[in-house]
Image: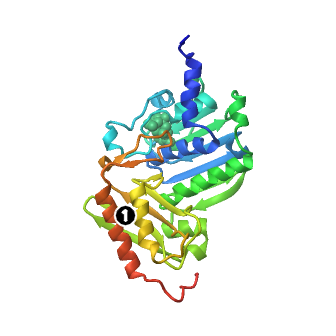
């Protein structure tokens, strides 16, 4: 017999697609901070983020009367047209998904608003009151999966969950290195970046020896813009885990044509099985991208790949031509 799922179960399933672990909570919150134009983002975790996560930003804030709406389902201030997405969020379900699986407390004050407000929300309940707050937004999430033991048991140890969060924060930091970032785990500062740019960011996360062997890359052609770092041919790695791409500020998995183009450019220069390192930020008109294919939005499709691919190829080729394989390496600073 076919029956309709009860509403609580429908909600749990939908929320579960967005939030499976503390790193998903952090991703949703820090993407909101980025979309809000924050220049300072702080992430604090306790107990691997299972006990508590706090993300604070100095962005545009949420007006008091809109706070309840912010945590509803399919409510967003961002989207007007799916082919014109310039923000990281647009599905209007990050905060909603979080409150289905944890206790959410959202405190905010737009810079122009006198005094702040706080919304406490858990599943169907919500309570709004006035509350003093600095300009910006602070989202606190407690007791992740507290009422969903099966999901909670599926989590890894707090230390492992904290590592996943640190990895994620590092990735966003590398793609947004002009912002100030801070990650605090159980009261201990793990990442502190003042916004000094991509070179600083690479040094912080990958160490000076690696950072000194990365070449700055800047190219612009028509509507495309590429900026970042790519390794000198003397530097490589047996894995592809430090070859990172963001499209319009969104960390993504490499679209295959772009990855193949980049690897081909290095092919003659690197030993077999070795990969280059780098962080690439590629900006292109939003209509080149199809983003809405997965809840974490990390898989994107290039709708018109060839011009983008050719642009990347020219940019990487000219960088590598200008820096041929050297016999002696520059000394680490
Ligand atoms: P989405 O990001 O897809 O819009 P969310 O549920 O994550 O969906 O957020 C809902 C809305 O709440 C956002 O569209 C935005 O208007 C507001 N919001 C959430 N977090 C912040 C923040 N840190 N600063 C300013 N506004 C925020
Ligand atoms: Mg969001």
Residues 298 and 281: in front is 298
Can residue 26 be seen here? The reply is yes
Can you identify the residue that label 1 sits on?
226
Where residue 32 appears, x then y in whole percent? Answer: 49, 43
Residue shown at the point (47%, 83%) measured from the top left: 325
> Which of the two residues, 309 or 14, is positioned nearer the viewer here?
309
Asked which colour scheme the image uses, the reply is: rainbow
Image position, residue 130 (x, y; %): 55, 30
Q: Residues within 10 Å of mark 1 (few under 14, many from 20)?
A: many
Q: Is residue 33 above or below residue 232?
A: above
Name the residue at the top extreme: 1
Q: Quadrant of residue 171?
A: bottom right
Quadrant of the image occupied by residue 29: top right
The image shows residue 316, relative to residue 194, as above or below, that is below
Judge left or right: residue 101 versus residue 176: right
Residue at the image position 56 percent from the left and 31 percent from the top:
15
Task: State which quarter of the image contains the C terminus.
Answer: bottom right
**Count of numbered tags:** 1
Q: Quadrant where the N terminus lies? A: top right
Horizontal and vertical percent position of residue 313:
35, 67
Q: Position of residue 165 (x, y in %)?
A: 63, 50
Asked if residue 146 shows in the view, the reply is: no
Rendered image quadrant of residue 281: bottom left
- In the rendered image, the vertical position of residue 37 relative to residue 96, given as above or below: below
Q: Residue at x 57, y 15 (%)?
A: 6
Disc 1 secondary structure class = strand
């Amino acid at each position: 017999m076919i029956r309709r799922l009860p509403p609580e179960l429908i909600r749990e399933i939908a929320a579960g697609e967005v939030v499976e672990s503390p790193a998903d909570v952090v991703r949703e919150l820090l993407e909101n901070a980025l979309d809000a134009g924050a220049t300072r983002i702080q992430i604090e975790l306790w107990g691997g983020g299972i006990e508590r996560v706090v993300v604070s930003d100095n962005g545009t804030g949420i007006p008091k009367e809109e706070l309840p709406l912010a945590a509803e389902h399919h409510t967003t201030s961002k989207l007007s047209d799916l082919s014109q997405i310039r923000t990281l969020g647009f599905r209007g379900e990050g905060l909603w998904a979080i409150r289905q699986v944890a206790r959410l407390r959202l405190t905010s004050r737009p810079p122009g608003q006198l005094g702040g407000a706080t919304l406490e929300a858990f599943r169907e309940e919500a309570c709004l009151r006035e509350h003093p707050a600095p300009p910006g937004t602070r989202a606190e999430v407690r007791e992740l999966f507290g009422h969903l033991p099966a999901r909670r048991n599926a989590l890894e140890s707090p230390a492992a969950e904290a590592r996943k969060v640190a990895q994620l924060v590092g990735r966003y930091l590398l793609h947004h290195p002009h912002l100030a970032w801070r990650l605090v785990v159980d009261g201990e500062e793990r990442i502190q970046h003042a916004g000094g740019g991509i070179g600083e960011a690479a040094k912080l996360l990958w160490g000076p020896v690696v950072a000194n062997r990365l070449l700055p890359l800047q190219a612009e052609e028509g509507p495309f813009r590429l900026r970042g770092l790519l390794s000198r041919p003397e530097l490589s790695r047996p894995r592809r885990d430090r070859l990172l791409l963001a499209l319009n500020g969104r960390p993504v998995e490499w679209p295959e044509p772009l990855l193949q183009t980049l690897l081909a450019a290095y092919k003659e220069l690197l030993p077999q099985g070795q990969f280059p390192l780098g962080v690439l930020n590629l900006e292109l008109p939003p209509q080149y991208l199809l983003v809405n294919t997965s809840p974490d939005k990390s898989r994107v499709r290039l709708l018109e790949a060839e011009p983008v691919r050719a642009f990347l190829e020219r940019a990487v080729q000219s960088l590598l031509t200008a820096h041929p394989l050297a016999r002696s390496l520059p000394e680490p600073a």
